[in-house]
Image (spheres, rainbow, N blue to C red):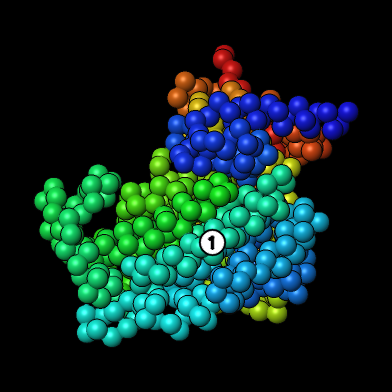
Amino acid sequence: MKKNRLLTAMCALAMLAANAEAATPSATSARAAAMPHLVQKDGHYALIVDGAPFVMLGGQAHNSSNYPGALKQVWAALKDAHANTLEIPIAWEQIEPVEGKFDFSYVDTLLAQARQNHIRLVPLWFGTWKNTSPSYAPEWVKFDNRRFPRMLGKDGKPSYCLSPLGEQTLKADRKAFVALMTHIRQIDAKQHTVIMVQVENEVGTWGLARDYSPAAEAAFRQPVPAAVLEHKKPPLPGAAGGSWSEVYGQYADEYFHAYAIASYIEEVAKAGRAVYNLPMYVNNALRDPLEPMAPWKNNFSAGGPSFDVIDIYRAAAPHIDLAAPDFYSPESSKVTATLDKFQRPDNALMVPEMSNAASYARYVYQILGRGSLGIAPFGLDYADYSNYPLGAKAKDKTMAAPFGAIFAAFRPVEHLWAQWALEGRTRGIAESDARTPQSMAFAGWTIKASFRQWQMGGEVGPDSKDFPPDTESPNGGVAVAQIGDGEFIVIGQHARLWFDGAGANAGKPSGYARVEEGQFDASGKWVMERNWNGDQVDSGLNLPGKPTVLKVRIRTYSY
Ligand code: DGJ
């Protein structure tokens, strides 16, 4: 009976998802073959896995956990974090240590153990570039720089970074990636343990805006390709065509480099998808979103998919579904500004990396509320390694706990939430560093959230001397889905909520019909634990520190 209800719910979700438009290029032939794929509807996206929308509540393993012996520590952390997806490197050096001789033993172990642990996988292809460097390329690639050239500076000196114009490098990387995708297809085409693939890792270059080798100089003098011109308008009104310098002026070097890297990645991704058509994305080490826009001055890795060149990636790499931000700057203003820049109608939001420091946990609400395909704190792994100060100091359960508590609240709605996000019904906020109230706008209603409030009484202002315990640092967050007229699912912590009529309900008196605390069961049915009333609603809906799920129904009335 329970199984039947689950199937019915899944079928309903699959039908709803099927009504959404297929996002190019991943869904074209994929739906028929039930491959994981993206769909989009009015600029909102969902990842479809086994026919139903799915939100990745993920964790990323540490860089060197990509060996069978290290996996035990990874599964243990994912379990504590209530994660449903693991992002983990598959390194070129480990699958092709000797040219042409492939070893997929790690990949086989990884998939087998992922299945045993009921975890989906997003392999990270550490190929030509890992954080811009060739560190994960095989030795036979890294040190043969006649065949696999490094970029050259204006002075002719080699950079550490492999050139995106290296034809042999591209050929070799593409061959290895195709071999990997072929192997994954062979062992996973039925089960879809692998649901998405990251191509390379945090590409770009430090120290040089682009390659200045003779081949690169010749390419730089060529006219800007039409597809780039179409997507990326010149920063100042100017030339409609011409060489990179003529069109993009002081931005030409960075843009040319972005085009070169994106074109390289396109060749790798296109060939990989030709053998096994999984969604693919690139990730970005962010540039400061609040700095006034200016040409590159070694303040970020040039040529990576930073927000200002997403258009160039879209033009050059149609086989890449999206460019995704990696969050390691804790400031809430930067997180919000970056999310604003990466979430676009033509670029689905996904956060493949975020610091695992506890202060970032609140961003899960904001990111999932914005309809992200998923999120993965980095280093959700009990290896004896901490990437503090970027991440948490702790390497044990206390590191996983803040994320685990939130993921546990979302896990029962991992399909429903993704469906609601696709329909544009979800919103999310994280308590800002300024700790000021924030609002979320819905059809007919506005929800205002304030922070550092006691559960009873009037609003506590910023000058109070008496704040609730455990609110010394910002840790509030709320994600809300409007599931009907005046009906909401609220998931949140450390926040006080007020609902007010807006639009057609503006100015009308209103009252709660129900404020049920509970959870969805595996079949998608709401199970109420208790109804909040009296003191529990008179001073707003005060979400405690433990992530709490509410089903709220509010109505207007007339005199
Ligand atoms: C971002 C990179 O993409 C990860 O592989 C890792 O190096 C983290 N930074 C920091 O530990």
Q: Position of residue 250 (x, y in %)?
A: 18, 65
Residues 138 and 2: in front is 138
Judge whether residue 57 can be spotted in this image.
no
Residue at the far right in the pictured view: 1
Residue at the far front in the pictured view: 100
Residues 477 and 225: in front is 225
Residue behind mark 1: 177
Classify residue 92 by image quadrant.
bottom right
Along the horizontal axis of the image, is 112 left or right of 317?
right
Q: Position of residue 510 (x, y in %)?
A: 58, 25
Secondary structure state at the residue bearing disc 1: helix
Q: Is residue 128 above or below residue 507?
A: below
Amino acid at circle 1: Phe
Label 1 environment density (alpha carbons within 10 Å; few <14, some 14–19, many ≥20): many
Residues 502 and 392: in front is 392
Q: Position of residue 105 (x, y in %)?
A: 71, 68
Residue at (33%, 72%) from the top-left corner? 299
Along the horizontal axis of the image, is 382 left or right of 497?
right
User: Which quadrant, please, contains the N terminus?
Assistant: top right
